[in-house]
């Protein structure tokens, strides 16, 4: 039987320890052994991994106004302007926030020497808060610029501020149109003007012969609340005359009307006169006119005669003429 004899150097304790360590390293390097060890050991959760497992809080939104203020304090003026300009676009800004944004923008622009933009920023601030006063702690350079910009803004009438105009009472022109006039006669027109606030500057009359063509313009006379106007007889022709009124204020704007060019007032003008012959007859000291003569007057053989029978006061055999006359009283 063969016996293994360990060399004398291998009997030392240090050699044995080294041998065991080498064998252990060889086993760890083996893939199958390493996989089996990994399956047996439970997964370890380190501090970093455990912390990441906790629910994260949403990031807080950046306050652009505070950021713009910080950039201004750090003399990052261009960056501050960009930040504040972005903040100004937010539709949810309150009036106080807008005032602060415009204030910081003005300070940035003043510092950079951009006067026009600085003045616009001051105006934007004053539109939001007209009574704003820059704090006394600000430098005289800023206070002087704000004062000059305010004075200029007020001298221009505070542009940008919506002014509430007082409600004005309406102007009313009352007028009754004649129904008919004779051809060639002047037509005197009257109207009543209601002008509670004294806004009326003038009244114009527009008229024309017929229902087509251009209107002729004429100025009407205004006497307190009464309006006088005349359509001349040369324009009074059959069959109709059209006209309308316009009331204008001091600037020439139309504030009231009676009729218009598309729907004018209309007066009928008949073709001819219905008057008959007039025969002045003196009766009892009064002058009477025969307004209408119907029949035939036997004068100088001009009119036809009608034969009739004899009667009281008539000569037998002579023709008798009949006359029918309507007589009305006429002025002297």
Image: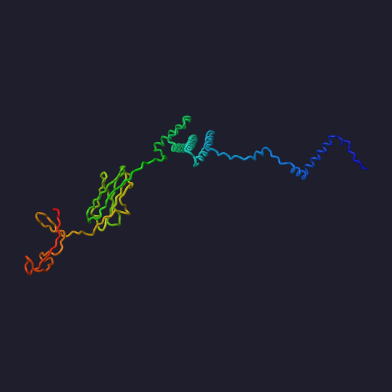
Q: Tell whether 298 sits left or right of 219.
A: left
Residue 222 spot, x, y in % from top left: 26, 45
Image quarter hosting the N terminus: top right
Q: Is residue 328 above or below residue 147?
A: below
Q: Quadrant of residue 323?
A: bottom left
Q: Position of residue 39 (x, y in %)?
A: 74, 44
Left or right, 87 with reference to 175 = right
Nearest the viewer among 285 and 106 is 285
Q: How is the image coloured?
A: rainbow
Q: Position of residue 61 (x, y in %)?
A: 55, 39
- Whole-percent x, y for residue 313 in the image: 6, 65
Q: Is residue 250 left or right of residue 23?
A: left
> Which one is in front, 121 or 181?
181
Q: Could you tell me which residue is drawn at 15 percent across and 64 percent down?
A: 295
Q: Which residue: 36% across, 42% down?
A: 167
In depth, the one of 145 and 208 nearer the eye is: 208
The tally of labels here is 0
Residue 112 visible from this viewpoint: no
Res. 20 in view: yes
Residue at position x 28%, y 55% in the image:
266
Point out the residue furthest to the bottom here: 317
Task: Return the residue found at the far right.
Answer: 1
């Amino acid at each position: 039987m063969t016996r293994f004899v360990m060399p004398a150097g291998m009997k030392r304790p240090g050699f044995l320890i080294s041998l065991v360590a080498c064998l252990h390293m060889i086993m760890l390097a083996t893939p199958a052994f390493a996989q089996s060890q990994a399956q047996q050991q439970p997964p370890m959760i380190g501090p970093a991994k455990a912390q990441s497992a906790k629910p994260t809080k949403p990031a807080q939104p950046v306050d652009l106004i505070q950021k713009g203020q910080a950039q201004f304090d750090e003399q990052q003026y261009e960056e501050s302007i960009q930040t504040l300009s972005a903040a100004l676009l937010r539709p949810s800004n309150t009036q106080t926030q807008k005032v602060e944004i415009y204030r910081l923008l003005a300070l940035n622009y003043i510092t950079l020497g951009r006067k026009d933009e600085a003045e616009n920023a001051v105006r934007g601030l004053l539109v939001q808060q007209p009574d704003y006063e820059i704090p006394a702690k600000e430098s005289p350079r800023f206070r002087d610029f704000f004062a000059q910009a305010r004075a200029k803004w007020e001298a221009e009438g505070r542009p940008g501020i919506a002014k509430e105009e007082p409600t004005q009472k309406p102007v009313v022109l009352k007028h009754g149109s004649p129904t008919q006039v004779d051809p060639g006669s002047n037509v005197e027109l009257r109207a009543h003007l209601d002008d509670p606030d004294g806004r009326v500057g003038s009244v114009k009359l527009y008229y024309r012969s017929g229902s087509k063509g251009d209107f002729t313009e004429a100025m009407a006379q205004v006497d307190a609340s009464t309006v006088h106007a005349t359509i001349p007889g040369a324009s009074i022709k059959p069959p109709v005359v059209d006209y309308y009124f316009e009331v204008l204020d001091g600037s020439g704007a139309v504030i009231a009307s009676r009729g218009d060019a598309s729907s004018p007032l209309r007066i009928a003008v008949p073709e001819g006169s219905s008057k008959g012959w007039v025969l002045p007859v003196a009766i009892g000291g009064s002058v009477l006119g025969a307004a209408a003569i119907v029949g035939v007057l036997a004068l100088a053989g001009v009119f036809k005669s009608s034969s009739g029978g004899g009667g009281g006061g008539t000569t037998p055999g002579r023709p008798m003429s009949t006359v029918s006359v309507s007589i009305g009283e006429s002025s002297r």
